[in-house]
Structures are given as structure tokens and as C-alpha cells.
């Protein structure tokens, strides 16, 4: 197994344990990995592309499945008032791989702390929306498009018409206030 | 539902007849699409399964046909979700239907010779290797732009080549059409539905068969919960058809795509191509270089091999003198197993000619998290794994296979036996994980 894949597998239980509930869902895992790679330049080697539900890379789920099979993480299906969802937590072999990847963890611990400080309380729907805003912003930036006349807001709304404009605007302003959007600069 | 100016039907060994409009026919007749007739779907798999001579050309037609059937079924079954959550009207749905057909037809137009087997030789940009989807997107926006946009039916639809590329690549330009991207690149996409059935048909195996009609009959758009985006799922009455597709894919990977000899031919082809290609890489998908890339197809590579190019691996391909499998790890290789494999690799030294790692292959091992809607209570949506114990128990494959040159096989096997013996003496077992490593 490549070192980068081991590092990705190590991150899964770390992210779960960092959450105040000591577990995270699949959407949170996907979006946290996206934020770490995109907003904090943690070298994870994922290739995210955009779906209606935001940035997605099937390799994140492959990593999750492998980490569960190797007992680095555990994943259980739970019933909630709004439906069913996965609870991902640390597995019995988590400490072994964390020990092996001690240097990686300590190098990026501040980024993990930052991630939870900024996004740790967001719901799945909010993570979908915010990660979509960041994804579209990075596309704007790559094409050297500046966000004028609410172009970023309109573009996000065209992808997610079920969100009202004011909600999207609020999250764009929040991200921009934290200096996380490139097309606004 | 009729396609735009439907004019002809193409006979397909899997789907019967595939209806094609005059507009689509012009795209199919374009040289960059015709190139797909010269790219085999499964590379050198015919060395193991002689029937595997089919091409990306017929697969692309099949994906367009399958994606359209899925699209029409979702539109018929879930019109309220499409209207309420994605603001669709009939005109919008007609337009996106044509976009999805084009995207499905053209999704593989950027494949390199012998398909996935040569993708490791794509060049890099900003430290990341190009993917065939990026070649497809660039070809659509350059070579095919005119034939897509300047057709009389397009006056009503106003489809842009960029829209199709954005849908395939997953970019914001696709707007709400991104909802349909799961039909093109998702766990239950038209691509895998077609290749499983088509590969099974041509190879003469049953592993990849599943109930496509039931899948189409039960596919749904599922409303998003608590503000999440809507996504695709299936009615509970289609549960076993969905389960069948997941299992079909698993069987095809273990029995066909990861077949020990088929994998060996992929390894030889990659090395031979590296020796044939200028600087050992394909041209990037940019400007004139893209035109150079499009000159590469199976015929050109076979011609080079017939002329004696391709070095040692080219000779091995021509003489059918492939490397032999001497060791394969458990399908799920845990930490202890990984340590043993590393030890084995070190001990084999020069006897180890090549190795294959399933996790690095084009196979994405993510397990099925497909939404199933309760037939009696549509509010009750659960993942497939909560219904299916078989799917729940499936594990991803990160198997490693070691190969040796034919003349070194006996020596390599002796060495492996020795290392396994030492391991057994020191650890008391070789049964590291869920199943034990097996040597051949």
C-alpha cells in the first residue's frame, strides 16, 4: 500500500475522534477530505469532481471501506428521525496506524483543528452547499474569472436550485470573511 | 420518446436495436468517433478469453442507449422531484435528455490505445496525471464542437459542446444537469451496466449478467432530506436487481478483469508502449498535441509491435511469452499481511519481474451505498447494505500479485515457500487476515 493511502486511512479515525460526537457520517468524511486538500493543501491525492451534492471522489469511499475491512475504522448504519445514516468511528487497529503515521499527523494537526473550528458544526446539507461554493470558486479562479455581480452566487444556485439565494449568499459571505474564496480577491 | 429526427437503428448484440438520430449519426461518422472502432474494450484479454475482440465503438453506442432508457424511466417515475427540486419543465428535460445522450455517446472518445491498459502513460499536469475523461472533454470542445453545435435541430435546444464536456468532467458549467452525472459516472451508471453485459456477452461468461430491465423499471429520483441534494435510487421492488448488478461487477473483477494472465498482458503492454511512444508518454490533450494523441490507436501500436518495436515486452507480447504469477496475497491485505508482502518482495529481489496492486487499478472498489425506497412508505429511504447481507459483507480488494519470468518461476516459488516457512515458524500462522495468501 502506498504511503499516501496509509495517510488517508489514518485520517479517517482521526477525523471521527475529533468530532464532538466521536463519529462522523459519510458526507462529512467526503467534504472534510475535500476541505483539507483544497483549503489547507494537505497532500491527499484525491481527484474531486462536481455532482449535485457537491465535490465527490469515489476513492474516499474506497478508503473508508478498506479502513473498515482493516479495522482502522468502524462503520455502522443508524436510524435517525430523518432517515438512515452511517456512523463512522475509530476501529480497534486505529492506534497502530496512527503510531506508524505519527509524523504525518503532527505535521497536519493544526489543519485538522482548523477544519473543525470552521466546519465542525455544519450539517450534511450545509457541508454540501459550502463545498460546492468552494468548488465553483476554484473553477472561477482557475479560469481567472472574478466574482462580479453575484456570478458565484448565480452559478451555485444553478447547480442547487433548491437553496434560496439568501442562504447561499450568507455562506459565500462567511467563506469570504474567512479569506477562503479566491474569486473574490 | 422519439430522438431528435430519428433516422436509423444500429444493430447491437446486447440491446437489439439502438436508435440514432441524424444529428448523432454525424457525430458517430466523425473520424474521432470512428477511431473507437480501433480501440479494443479489454486490451489483450482475448489471450485468455478469445471472444474479447469488441471495441469502445459499440460500447459507446450501448452506453448512450442505456443512459437514455434510465433517463426516460426517471422522468416517467419521478417527475415531481425533477420539477420541485430542480425546477425542470418539459423543455428543460428534453434539452438535458439530448445532453445526456451526447455525453454518454462521447464519454470514452478520449481513450488511449487498448483502453485502461495504457492509461499509466498519460502525461502529468501540475503533478497530476491526465485522465481519459479530460481527453474526452477536450476532444468534444475542439474536434467535435462544430458537428455538435451547428446542426439545424440545435436551433431549438442550443446545446454547447462546453455543456457536454462540463457534464462529463463534473464542472459548474453543467449547472443543474449535474444531477444526471450519476448516470454517466456513478455507482449505478450506464457505463458499467453496458460494459458488464457486453463483456459477458463477448467473453462467453455469465458473471456480469443482471436484470437490466428491472433496474430501469425501478430507478427513481429521490428527494433530498433536510436540505441535501436529490439523488438517484431504486424502488424496493428492484432491490434484488440492484444487488445482482453489484455482485455481477464483483464477479467480473475477480474472474475476468483481475485474471492473472490478463493482468500480465496489461503489464507487458504498458512497458512495450512506453518503449514505442516518444519520450515514453502520450501527448497531452492540448492544442496540436491533441491531434497527435488522436493518431494513436490499437492499429498503430500493433503495427509498431509487428515492426519489432516495443523492446523486450513487445517481443513477449508477440511470442505470447508472458510473465507468470508466482504469488497472490489475500484479497483484503491487512497490516500484518502488508508486512509479510514487503518481506517477500525484498527476499525475491531480482526474481520479482513485475507486481500488480488491485487498489491502483482502474477498478474503484467503493462499496454499494445505493439508496432504496420502501415501496409502502416512500419516506423510508435506506442504503442497499441495510437490506442485503451479501452486499454488507463485501470487502474491497487490495490484493497484490507477484509475477516472475517464465525461466525464473521455479526458483521464485522455492523462495516464496522458504519465506512462508520462516514466517510460519516465527508467527505460527500465515493466516494474517480474513483469508490466507495463496501461491500458485
Image: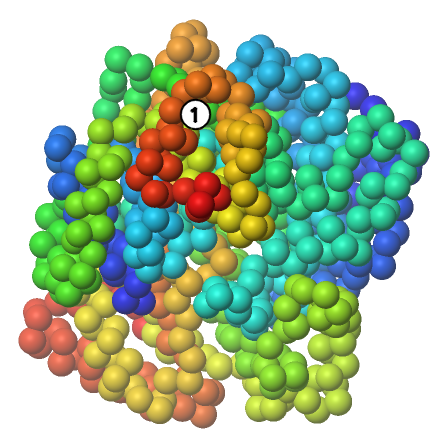
Q: Can residue A147 be seen in this view?
A: yes
Horizontal side, residue A103 vs residue A43: left or right: left
Residue A12 at x, y percent in the picture: 23, 47
Disc 1: which residue: A169
- Asked where in the image residue B194 lies, by quadrant, the reply is top right
Residue at 70 percent across and 22 percent down: it is B93
Q: How many marks?
A: 1
Q: Which quarter of the image is occupied by the C terminus of chain B?
A: bottom left
Q: What element carries label 1?
A: helix
Q: Which residue is drawn at 70% across and 29% down?
A: B96
The residue that appears at 49% across and 66% down in the rendered structure is B126
Vertical placement of residue B212 versus B342, above or below? above
The residue nearer to you, when weighing B147 against B271, is B147
- Report the side of B93 relative to B216 (left or right): right
Residue at the farthest top position: B376
Split into 4 quadrants, where in the image is the N terminus of chain B? top right
Amino acid at each position: 500500500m502506498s504511503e499516501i493511502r496509509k495517510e488517508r486511512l489514518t485520517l479517517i479515525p482521526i477525523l471521527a475522534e475529533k468530532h464532538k460526537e466521536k463519529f462522523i457520517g459519510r458526507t462529512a468524511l467526503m467534504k472534510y477530505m475535500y476541505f483539507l486538500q483544497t483549503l489547507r493543501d494537505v497532500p491527499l491525492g484525491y481527484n474531486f469532481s462536481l455532482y449535485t451534492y457537491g465535490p465527490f471522489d469515489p476513492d474516499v469511499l474506497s478508503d473508508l471501506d478498506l479502513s473498515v475491512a482493516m479495522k482502522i475504522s468502524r462503520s455502522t448504519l443508524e436510524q435517525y428521525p430523518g432517515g438512515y445514516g452511517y456512523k463512522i468511528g475509530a476501529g480497534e487497529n486505529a492506534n497502530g496506524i496512527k503510531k506508524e503515521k505519527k509524523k504525518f499527523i503532527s505535521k497536519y494537526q493544526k489543519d485538522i483543528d482548523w477544519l473543525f473550528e470552521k466546519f465542525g458544526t455544519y450539517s450534511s446539507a450545509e457541508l454540501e452547499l459550502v463545498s460546492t461554493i468552494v468548488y465553483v470558486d476554484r473553477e472561477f479562479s482557475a479560469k481567472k474569472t472574478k466574482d462580479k455581480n453575484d456570478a458565484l452566487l448565480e452559478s451555485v444556485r444553478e447547480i442547487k436550485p433548491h437553496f434560496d439565494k439568501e442562504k447561499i449568499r450568507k455562506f459565500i459571505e462567511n467563506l469570504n470573511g474567512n479569506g477562503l474564496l479566491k474569486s473574490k480577491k | 420518446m422519439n430522438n431528435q429526427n430519428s433516422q436509423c437503428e444500429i444493430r447491437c448484440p446486447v440491446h437489439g436495436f439502438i436508435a440514432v438520430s441524424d444529428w448523432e449519426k454525424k457525430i458517430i461518422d466523425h473520424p474521432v468517433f470512428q477511431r473507437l472502432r480501433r480501440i479494443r474494450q479489454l486490451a489483450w484479454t482475448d489471450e485468455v478469453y478469445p471472444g474479447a475482440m469488441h471495441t469502445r465503438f459499440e460500447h459507446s453506442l450501448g452506453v448512450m442507449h442505456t443512459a437514455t432508457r434510465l433517463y426516460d424511466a426517471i422522468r416517467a417515475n419521478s417527475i415531481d422531484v425533477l420539477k420541485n427540486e430542480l425546477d425542470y419543465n418539459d423543455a428543460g428535460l428534453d434539452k438535458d435528455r439530448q445532453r445526456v445522450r451526447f455525453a454518454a455517446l462521447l464519454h470514452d472518445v478520449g481513450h488511449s490505445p487498448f483502453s485502461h491498459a495504457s492509461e499509466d502513460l498519460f502525461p502529468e499536469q501540475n503533478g497530476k496525471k491526465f485522465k481519459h475523461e479530460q481527453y474526452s472533454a477536450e476532444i468534444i470542445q475542439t474536434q467535435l464542437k462544430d458537428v455538435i453545435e451547428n446542426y439545424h435541430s440545435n436551433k431549438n435546444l442550443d446545446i454547447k459542446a462546453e455543456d457536454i464536456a462540463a457534464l462529463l468532467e463534473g464542472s459548474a458549467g453543467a449547472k443543474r444537469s449535474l444531477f444526471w452525472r450519476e448516470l454517466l459516472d456513478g455507482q449505478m451508471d450506464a457505463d458499467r451496466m453496458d460494459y458488464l453485459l457486453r463483456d459477458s456477452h463477448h467473453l462467453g461468461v455469465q458473471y456480469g449478467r443482471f436484470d437490466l430491465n428491472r433496474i430501469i423499471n425501478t430507478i427513481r429520483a429521490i428527494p433530498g432530506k433536510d436540505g441535501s441534494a436529490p439523488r438517484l435510487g431504486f424502488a424496493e421492488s428492484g432491490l434484488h436487481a440492484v444487488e445482482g448488478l453489484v455482485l455481477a461487477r464483483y464477479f467480473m473483477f475477480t474472474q475476468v478483469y483481475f485474471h492473472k494472465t490478463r493482468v500480465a498482458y496489461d503489464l507487458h503492454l504498458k512497458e512495450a508502449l512506453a518503449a514505442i511512444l516518444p519520450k515514453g508518454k502520450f501527448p497531452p490533450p492540448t492544442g496540436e498535441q491533441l491531434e497527435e494523441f488522436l493518431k494513436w490507436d490499437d492499429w498503430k501500436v500493433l503495427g509498431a509491435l509487428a515492426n519489432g518495436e516495443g523492446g523486450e515486452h513487445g517481443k513477449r507480447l508477440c511470442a505470447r511469452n508472458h510473465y507468470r504469477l508466482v504469488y497472490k496475497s489475500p484479497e483484503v491485505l491487512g497490516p500484518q499481511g502488508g508486512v509479510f508482502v514487503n518481506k517477500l518482495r525484498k527476499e525475491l529481489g531480482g526474481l520479482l519481474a513485475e507486481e500488480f496492486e488491485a487498489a491502483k487499478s482502474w477498478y474503484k472498489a467503493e462499496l454499494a451505498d445505493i439508496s432504496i425506497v420502501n415501496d409502502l412508505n416512500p419516506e423510508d429511504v435506506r442504503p442497499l447494505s441495510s437490506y442485503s447481507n451479501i452486499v454488507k459483507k463485501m470487502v474491497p480488494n487490495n490484493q497484490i500479485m507477484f509475477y516472475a519470468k517464465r525461466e525464473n518461476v521455479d526458483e521464485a516459488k522455492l523462495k516464496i515457500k522458504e519465506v512462508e516457512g520462516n514466517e510460519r515458524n516465527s508467527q505460527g500462522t500465515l493466516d494474517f487476515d480474513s483469508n490466507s495468501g495463496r501461491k500458485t
